[in-house]
Image (cartoon, rainbow, N blue to C red):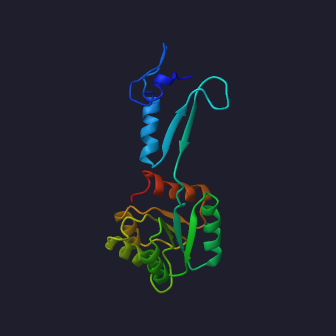
Amino acid sequence: GIPAEALEKVMERYFTVGEQACGTGLGLAISKEIVEMHGGTIRIVSPPPEGGQGAAVYISMPVVEAPEILIVDDDPAIQDLLEQQVVSQGYRVAKAGDGAEALESIMRKKPDAVLLDLVLPKVDGSEVILRMKSDKSMTRIPIIVVTGAHVSRAKGEILQNFAIPAISKPWHEAELLDRVEGAFFGSAALSK
């Protein structure tokens, strides 16, 4: 447990309690900083309200909405499969069946990421990329290309210049989910 007189100081850097053989007094201080940076709170109760020895640490974090991924493909079966795979990981999904619908949805909803086929009716996928990257309100939205088409040299240069990863159809679910996770957690494989 933590003595009552030490409870207010125990989350300060380098503060230790008792005659410990190890410990730097940083664990709770760093934990507090991380929790507060995410808008949460942390408190310690000693002894625990349930009785017994030790201390109880309570962390409260705000509820946030899951990231939304816009799936852009003209094949409803592909849309459904992609949706099933990303929803299973906790993401929300919006869908678009062509490039024009995708651009309208991106402008209106500002999704957190876009899964984009390159061959689309109305506005081609490479044109969607160029428009997104030239508009300040859309340029930082991560794009992951999922395509069955041969990537021409010109389209390949667009993907390379904007560091946009491309996954071939049929894809491996694990690779897709790694790329999606990288879009949100700064994987070296993706560039925002």
Furthest residue to the bottom?
122
Horizontal and vertical percent position of residue 99: 47, 80
Image quarter where the N terminus lies is: top right
Image quarter where the C terminus lies is: bottom left
Residue depicted at 53% across the width and 23% down the height: 2
* Residue 21 vertical placement versus 132 (above, below): above
Furthest residue to the front?
5
* Residue 23 vertical placement versus 181 (above, below): above
* Residue 96 vertical placement versus 88 (above, below): below
Horizontal and vertical percent position of residue 90: 60, 58
Does residue 98 appear to the left or right of 77 in the view shown? Answer: left
* Residue 65 vertical placement versus 100 (above, below): above
Horizontal and vertical percent position of residue 48: 62, 30
Pick the front one: 77 or 30: 30
Pick the front one: 16 or 110: 16
Residue depicted at 47% across the width and 19% down the height: 17
Residue depicted at 45% across the width and 49% down the height: 39
Residue depicted at 48% across the width and 43% down the height: 41
Pick the front one: 157 or 173: 173
Number of numbered discs on residues = 0
Does residue 99 appear to the left or right of 56 in the view shown? Answer: left
Horizontal and vertical percent position of residue 7: 48, 27
Q: Quadrant of residue 155?
A: bottom left
